[in-house]
Image (spheres, grey):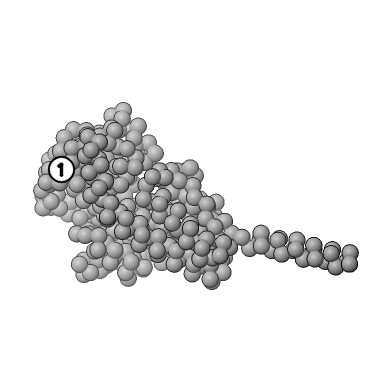
Amino acid sequence: MKLMRNLTLASAFALAAFAAQAQTTLRFAHPVPEGDLQHQMATFFADQVAERTGGSVTVQIFPQGQLGNDGAMIDGTRSGIIDIVLVGLNNFTGLVPVSGVFELPFMFPSRADAYAALDGEVGQEIAAKFSEHGLHVLGFPENGFRTMTNSRGPIRVPEDLNGINMRTNNSRALNDMFAALGANPLQLPIAELYTALETGVVNAQDHPVAIVLSFRYDEVQRYLTLTNHAYSALGFMMNANRFNGLSESEQSAIMEAAAEAVAMQRDMAAENEAAMVAELEGRGMVVNSDIDAAAFQAAVTSVWDAFIADNGDAEVNAIMALQ
């Protein structure tokens, strides 16, 4: 009897050890506050992964840059310190320069056009290039159409940007665009942007309205212009070795959860945009959308020319053909 009890206990300990070994926890980092739609997408994804894998894979989320700035999170994901990262796709153009095609000014007339390119053949071919850099693409969620905020006045024509100190991200297309429009682009990490606006280091910035709202830029910026001058996608990436080390069923569960999370986040972004603009107005921002779009587009053709000179025109033509 004693021997049987010992064997039973040994089996229980062995099963517990196996279960512990089979449990996988993925570290998921992103830069936005917990109130942002991107964080809501992250929590939805985590719930879906746990449900679809029966708890064999769980996701631990680190929001608002807890694990570093965008570049540090990408480096951490490539090295395996972080398992999953969600940041602006522009942050990956140093690894895969051609992915900058999605950032070209006035490339996409609508969200539907952007989704067709990102989810279709063009997006898949570009996604495959990230495997060379230790990354597996889970999808391209939405950051959104970029708007401009500033403390000087409404923006209606390109000349309204002359001499303005515009914070930019590290997208070459956006930096070239603002330079072509007469602004003074200054690259700053998003973690430093609120203080830079508050102290006057820069007096303008460009982001989708969801980011303007979640980072409370209305507190330090008076004017919001709905220029929609570029569509910005997010890079939703996983360490390739970590992904490949999972079972086939776990890999499928993660990809299915990611696809649902991306679709959910895109839908919410589109549905909530008008309400977010109204909320910013309610907080005191002066909002305008009466811009001379043709004048802006004519002023930034050099940005497209520079991209094509460096990367060729295959991706540009493929995207235009979809429209």
From the image, tell me which residue sits under label 1. Answer: 288
Q: Which sits in the foreground, 83 or 9?
A: 9
Q: What element carries label 1?
A: strand
Image x and y of residue 27, in percent: 52, 52
At x 48% / y 58%, what residue is drawn?
A: 47
Image x and y of residue 174, in percent: 26, 48
Give left or right: position of 58 versus 43: right
| In the rendered image, the vertical position of residue 315 relative to residue 105, given as above or below | below
At x 52% / y 52%, what residue is drawn?
A: 60
What residue occupies the far right of the structure in this picture? Answer: 2
Q: Residue 323, can we see it?
A: yes
In the rendered image, which quarter is residue 258 located in?
A: bottom left
Give left or right: position of 236 versus 317: right
Q: Residue 316, can we see it?
A: no
Question: Quarter of the image containing the N terminus?
Answer: bottom right
Question: Dot 1 surroundings within 10 Å: few (below 14), some, or many (20 or more)?
Answer: some
Which amino acid, mark 1? Asn
At x 71% / y 64%, what residue is drawn?
A: 15
Numbered disc total: 1
Give left or right: position of 194 versus 76: left
In the rendered image, which quarter is residue 268 located in?
A: bottom left
Question: Quarter of the image containing the C terminus?
Answer: bottom left
What residue occupies the far top of the structure in this picture? Answer: 199
At x 40% / y 63%, what residue is drawn?
A: 260
Image x and y of residue 95, in percent: 40, 56
Image x and y of residue 225, in percent: 19, 43
Q: Which sits in the foreground, 223 or 293?
A: 223
